[in-house]
Image (cartoon, grey):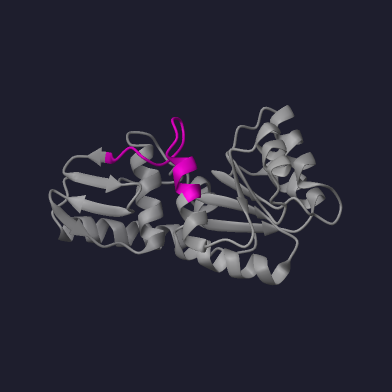
């Protein structure tokens, strides 16, 4: 699940990124409205966490531009502005949720997952194929009734493949959803995860297979 964090406080952003990464998100961080616009123009995210007090513009301007472009990506405003007027204004401007600093990380993660469970979003519906089931909320895989452990990256690859079952999934698509903008991607990283998944699925007698079309996906 790829998340864009728009926050100008570098230390706070790094701490928050660490916590969200631990919860299974792939997090990109920008600190200005200009950088946010540039990144949103060229990348797709499942959810955006938006601070309002940016150094070069109000965060609401970024939100307004997203909605004018008909970008329906869920946006959670995370800000110190906590008055009733501020909350009403933020939600009225197109935000999907509003959380005031200080806050508990657990609540932020729960709110983000709730946004992604809404109709048309990523979470909420179990993904099933053969005897394999992925609980997208609990981030747990079952083969039959047996829970199976996967690393966060392996789980992310498996989820993307299950969501596109029966279709060819390009390597670049998997890379874009596994790594943030600032992360270096090994030339064979995706191949390594696919190999691990194949091996693990065979070990647990899953009735699903991952096929490779050379040069395609």
Instruction: Please state, as top left, top right, bottom left or bottom right, where the C terminus lies in the image.
Output: top left
Q: Which portion, as a residue range, is magenta?
A: 111-127
Residue farthest front in this picture: 84
Q: How many marks?
A: 0
Q: Quadrant of residue 47?
A: top right
> Measured from the top left, where is residue 109 in percent x and y?
48, 55
Q: Is residue 209 visible?
A: no
Q: Which quarter of the picture shows residue 155?
A: bottom left
Q: Position of residue 210 (x, y in %)?
A: 29, 47
User: Which residue is at a point 65% across and 36% down the rendered structure image?
Assistant: 91
Q: Position of residue 204 (x, y in %)?
A: 15, 58
Q: Is residue 35 left or right of residue 102?
A: right
Residue at the image point whose x is 53% and y is 57% from the top: 26
Quarter holding residue 86: top right
At which x and y percent is residue 181?
64, 57
Residue under the point 46% across and 62% down: 189
Decide if residue 111 is on the left or right side of residue 208: right
Identify which residue, 142 or 205, lies in the foreground. Answer: 142
């Amino acid at each position: 699940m790829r998340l864009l964090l728009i926050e100008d406080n570098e230390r706070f952003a790094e701490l928050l990124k660490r916590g969200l990464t631990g919860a299974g998100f792939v997090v990109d961080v920008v600190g200005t409205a200009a950088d946010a616009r540039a990144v949103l123009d060229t990348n797709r995210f499942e959810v955006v966490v938006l601070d309002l007090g940016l150094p070069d513009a109000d965060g609401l301007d970024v939100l307004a531009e997203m909605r004018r472009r008909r970008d329906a990506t869920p946006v959670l405003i995370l800000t110190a502005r906590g008055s009733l007027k501020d909350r009403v204004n933020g939600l009225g401007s197109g935000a999907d949720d509003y959380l005031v600093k200080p806050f508990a990380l657990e609540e932020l993660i729960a709110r983000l997952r709730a946004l992604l469970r809404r109709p048309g979003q990523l979470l909420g519906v179990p993904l099933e194929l053969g005897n394999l089931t992925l609980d997208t909320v609990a981030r747990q895989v079952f083969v039959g009734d047996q829970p199976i452990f996967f690393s966060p990256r392996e789980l992310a690859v498996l989820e993307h493949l299950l969501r596109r079952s029966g279709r060819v999934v390009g390597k670049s698509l998997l890379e874009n959803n596994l790594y943030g903008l600032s992360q270096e991607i090994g030339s064979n990283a995706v191949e390594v995860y696919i190999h691990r998944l194949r091996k693990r699925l065979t070990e647990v007698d899953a009735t699903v297979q991952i096929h490779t079309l050379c040069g395609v996906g």
